[in-house]
Image (tube, helix red, strand yellow):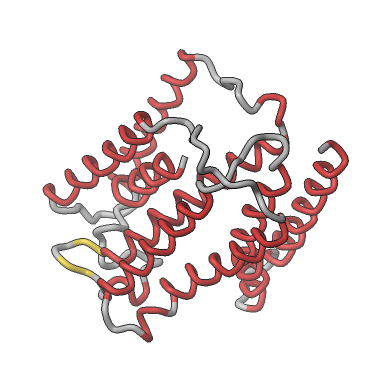
């Protein structure tokens, strides 16, 4: 799921809006110059690949599976509809490429983004669904997972948003980012995630990971973006209600 999310991150940010390459993309800030080499915003690209892999794809899928556990292993769309949705995705990507900005990336860099996206998708397809060996550990308390991934969420955000102002080395920032995501993944795959016994543990990982985003939405209210505190409160309430529901069922 993380690999497919990474592929999606490249599709959206690299192929469609081209923020991986455009030095004047509206959201870049210091990352428009910090870590830019050979017409690629490398630090920004790594951050967005991790962000989309975790927050745009994996977490929503996990939440939907927790809300609808009885349909967790079902296919939700037919082959025909799936192909139609892929066609829509391609059309939207092409529209964004041509009309969102006038910037056009260099062809070699753009081609490498396509190759990277394809590799992530291929490896995700080839990887086994899960482990079956005896080295898998039993799951610990959900509270501990929440704290660990709460700290991880804050570390990720501080690294990429504040790190460039403190650590004057793009390779170091990127290395730390890779260590953070790979370390979190390695930590998670050690455990037995048999469902439904681990439903609350899954929610704890999701809730901890979303903690910084929920706090950030509160802070955005003070910057004049009206309504974001409502989003934060609604998110907290929804997560608590889901936790209550799962406690009643499992």
Depth check, front residue: 193 or 133? 133
Q: Residue furthest right?
A: 248
Relative side of 216 to 78, left or right:
right
The residue sitting at 23% across, 46% down in the picture is 113
Q: State the image coordinates of residue 146 (x, y, percent, origin top left).
A: 67, 60
Depth check, front residue: 6 or 233? 6
The residue sitting at 31% across, 38% down in the picture is 94
Q: State the image coordinates of residue 165 (x, y, percent, origin top left).
A: 37, 84
Quadrant location of residue 218? bottom right
Count of picture labels: 0
Q: Residue furthest front?
A: 134
Quadrant location of residue 70? top right
Depth check, front residue: 121 or 104? 121
The residue sitting at 54% across, 66% down in the picture is 152
User: Which image quarter is the C terminus in?
Assistant: top right
- Is residue 81 shown above or below 138? above
Quadrant location of residue 175? bottom left
The residue sitting at 70% across, 64% down in the picture is 227
Q: State the image coordinates of residue 216 (x, y, percent, origin top left).
A: 61, 70
Q: State the image coordinates of residue 158 (x, y, percent, origin top left).
A: 48, 75
- Is residue 146 shown above or below 81? below
């Amino acid at each position: 799921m993380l690999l497919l999310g990474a592929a999606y991150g490249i599709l959206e940010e690299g192929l469609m809006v081209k923020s991986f390459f455009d030095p004047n993309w509206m959201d870049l800030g210091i990352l428009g110059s910090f870590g830019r080499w050979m017409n690629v915003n490398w630090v920004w690209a790594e951050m967005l690949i991790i962000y989309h892999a975790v927050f745009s794809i994996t977490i929503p899928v996990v939440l939907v599976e927790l809300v609808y556990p009885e349909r967790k292993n079902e296919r939700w769309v037919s082959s025909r509809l799936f192909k139609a949705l892929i066609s829509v995705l391609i059309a939207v990507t092409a529209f964004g490429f041509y009309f969102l900005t006038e910037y056009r990336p260099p062809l070699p860099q753009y081609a490498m983004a396509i190759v990277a996206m394809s590799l992530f998708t291929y490896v995700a397809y080839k990887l086994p669904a899960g482990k079956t060996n005896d080295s898998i550990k039993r799951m610990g308390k959900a509270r501990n997972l929440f704290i660990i991934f709460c700290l991880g969420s804050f570390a990720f955000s501080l690294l990429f948003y504040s790190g460039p102002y403190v650590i004057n080395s793009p390779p170091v920032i990127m290395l730390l980012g890779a260590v953070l995501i790979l370390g979190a993944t390695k930590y998670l795959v050690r455990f037995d995630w048999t469902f439904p016994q681990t439903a609350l543990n899954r929610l704890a990982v999701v809730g901890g990971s979303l903690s910084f985003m929920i706090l950030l939405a509160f802070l955005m209210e003070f910057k004049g973006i009206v309504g974001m505190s409502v989003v934060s409160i609604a998110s907290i309430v929804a997560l608590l209600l889901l936790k209550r529901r799962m406690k009643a069922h499992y």
